[in-house]
Image: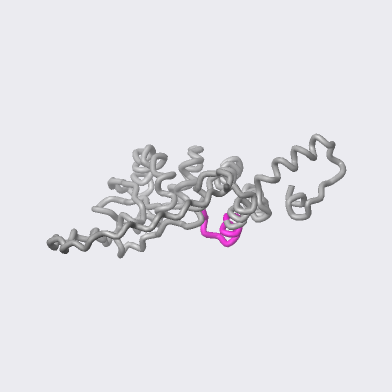
Amino acid sequence: MLVLRSTGRMNSDFSPEEQEELQRISKGFSVEKLLYSIKTLSEAVASAKYTSLPAVVFQSAVIKLCIEHNDGSYDALLARVGELERRLAEGTVAIPAAKPAPAEQKKEEPPEEQPLEPEKEIYAPQSDFVEKIKDKWPEIMGDVSADFKITLFTYLENCSLREYRDKLAITFSDATFAAFRDEVKNNLDYLKRLIKKHCGLDCGLTVKADSDFGKGGQTVKSDPIDELLKLPITEIE
């Protein structure tokens, strides 16, 4: 399929029906997406040789390829840009119509000044319990993997740990928070038990987005590529 997408040629060993099916399937992938998928699966094959649970490694790799979010790597970014270019070339990304210019309004007297709302508080760590949990996090993730909680394991690989009102905040970027939140919230009691087991701590847990920490908490802005990929797939008129 990679040869077909990059050169437009196909091996003559395939039957006409198989060639037609490959042509149809290949139109749904960019060259960059195929290269990223091959690299991700190759890394999974290499990692599986050194673990007692190779199925977990392969399942995590497949889930990673199925969800459209950036894992921070250069190859993932190329794959997402390539996918966007493919959609634009095929005319399957809707271009929003320009908004009409607002009508001129009569000048009005300025309203009375209202008291400014207080900014979100920035919760600085008050104790070292978060650092203690971070030290034991690889062992906690090992238990999640051993318990075959594949989806939870994949989502937690993309989180950061912070303190929020004396609780441990499992924090995701604003771009992935909505997709990951429910699965993690449904497993908070399970994670509490693991933290108690490995750290001896009985702390509260919550799930937060980066923006919940205010402008001093390194808020992650919405990813523009993700926003373009989420546009409805309709033909451009």
Which residue reaches farthest right?
12
In this image, 163 relative to 50: left or right? left
Q: Residue furthest top?
A: 17
The residue lying at 66 percent from left, 52 percent from top is 30
Q: Residue at x 65, y 45 (%)?
A: 28
19 up-or-down from 108: above or below: above
- Above or below, comparing residue 106 to residue 24 in the picture: below
Q: Position of residue 202 (x, y in %)?
A: 28, 45
* Residue 55 is a magenta residue: no
In which quadrant of the rendered view does residue 197 lie? top left
Please indicate, yes or no, whether residue 46 appears anywhere in the rendered image. Answer: no
What x and y, as percent, mark residue 188?
35, 41
Residue 230 in sight: yes
For the residue pair 201 and 56, the one nearer the viewer reads as: 56
Residue ID at (77%, 38%): 20
Which stretch did the figure color magenta?
70-80
Provide residue 159's location: percent of width, then percent of height. 42, 52
| Horizontal side of residue 80 vs 222, given as left or right | right
Residue 71 counted in the magenta span? yes
Q: Is residue 111 above or below residue 95?
A: below
Q: Position of residue 51 (x, y in %)?
A: 59, 47
The residue lying toward the viewer, choosing from 146 and 221, is 221
Q: Main secondary structure of the magenta part?
A: helix
Residue 219, quarter of the rendered image: bottom left
Of residues 193 and 177, the one nearer the viewer is 177
| Colouring of the image | one colour
